[in-house]
């Protein structure tokens, strides 16, 4: 007579266990969902370019994702470890070790004399001075114009000896094959069209892409470097309307310098932007500091202290 009661008690116990297991499973799923949401938020934060935090360097994939998000980002040039460390600490996500070092650091009138050995030396210093920024090394004039094989040899040096995360080279359709071989070999390439300073002897320093024919050529150049596999393209001294059209047309980011506000990113030569370069600045440069004035005043103050006998003082001496 007690068997049905015992069976009912067993069923109740089993039901209770099933309910508890279901609740535990639901709680585990919720915890998993919460963790996935947190991971997604963390991933979003880690891929924000300017001001983002993380224990790894910015990559070309991060650059591509920024375009998808509509995030604009800054790029500055850098040529030495100390300056690069300042920009890295400031959150600049991409630095270009440009052959513009020829003009602003090596005393040349143009970028043409800059050598690959010099670019390897400067790029390695910038890499050592940074921990987060993507470092892009410029291929100087004469290091890739012979063709894809020469370009690959030169780029390999910047990657292997200097440790850069990407290289940059000038030219659109004419550089298609060089870009493609480098990308196929695993070297990310930032292209550069519009005004290409290495062609100063044939091109001069003037706006590129004015007029229908020139505009169409610039568009062809932009599409050519994208088709070759470039992860980004610099547009230099290009009419703002044309640069904006190129930006809308391409799925890779555009980096403007003298190309208006419609590009995905902006780059300036740091000595121009921080007021170290002397003389008249190009119209597209905005100066954010007057380092030339600050350094001049500091040098004069030092000289006056030495001449006046007020430096060094006791606190500057050892015994």
Image: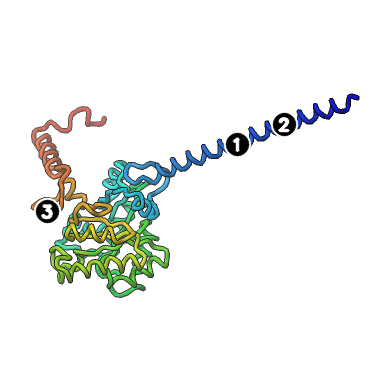
Mark closest to the chain's N terminus, 1 or 3: 1
Using residue 46 as the reference point, say whether residue 120 is left or right of it. Answer: left
Residue carrying label 3: 283
Determine if residue 250 is in view: yes
Residue highlighted by disc 2: 17
Residue drawn at the location 25% of the way across and 50% of the way down:
76
Q: Check disc 2: other Cα within 10 Å, few if <14, some if 14-19, many if 20+.
A: few
Residue 223, image x and y in percent?
Answer: 30, 67
SS class of the residue under badge 2?
A: helix
Label 1 neighbour load within 10 Å: few <14, some 14-19, many 20+: few
Element under label 3? Answer: loop
**Location of residue 207 by image quarter:** bottom left
In the rendered image, residue 190, in percent from the top left (x then y), is placed at 31, 61
Name the side, left or right, on which 197 lies relative to 162.
Answer: left
Q: CA distance from mark 2 to mark 1?
A: 16 Å
- Provide the residue designation for mark 1: 28
């Amino acid at each position: 007579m007690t068997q049905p009661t015992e069976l009912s008690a067993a069923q109740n116990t089993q039901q209770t266990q099933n309910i508890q297991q279901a609740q535990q499973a639901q709680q585990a799923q919720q915890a998993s969902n919460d963790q996935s949401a947190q991971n997604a938020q963390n991933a979003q934060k880690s891929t924000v370019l300017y001001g983002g935090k993380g224990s790894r360097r910015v990559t070309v994939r991060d650059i591509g994702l920024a375009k998808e998000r509509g995030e604009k980002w800054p790029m500055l040039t850098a040529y030495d470890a100390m300056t690069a460390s300042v920009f890295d600490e400031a959150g600049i996500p991409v630095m270009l070790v440009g052959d513009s070092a020829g003009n602003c650091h090596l005393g040349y009138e143009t970028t043409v004399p800059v050598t690959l050995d010099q670019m390897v030396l400067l790029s390695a210093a910038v890499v050592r001075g940074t921990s987060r920024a993507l470092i892009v090394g410029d291929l100087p004039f004469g290091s890739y114009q012979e063709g894809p094989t020469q370009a690959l040899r030169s780029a390999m040096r910047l990657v292997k000896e200097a440790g850069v995360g990407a290289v940059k080279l000038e030219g659109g359709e004419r550089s298609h094959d060089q870009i493609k071989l480098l990308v196929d070999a695993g070297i990310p390439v930032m292209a550069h069209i519009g005004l290409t300073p290495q062609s100063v002897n044939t091109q001069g320093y003037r706006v590129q892409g004015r007029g229908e024919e020139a505009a169409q050529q610039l568009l062809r150049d932009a599409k050519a470097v994208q088709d070759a596999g470039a992860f980004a393209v610099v547009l230099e001294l290009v009419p703002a309307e044309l640069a904006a059209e190129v930006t809308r047309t391409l799925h890779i980011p555009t980096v403007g310098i003298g190309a208006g506000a419609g590009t995905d990113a902006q780059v300036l030569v740091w000595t121009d932007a921080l007021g170290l370069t002397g003389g008249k600045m190009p119209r597209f440069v905005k100066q954010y500091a007057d380092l030339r004035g600050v350094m001049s005043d500091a040098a004069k103050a030092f000289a006056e202290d030495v001449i006046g006998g007020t430096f060094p003082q006791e606190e500057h001496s050892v015994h």
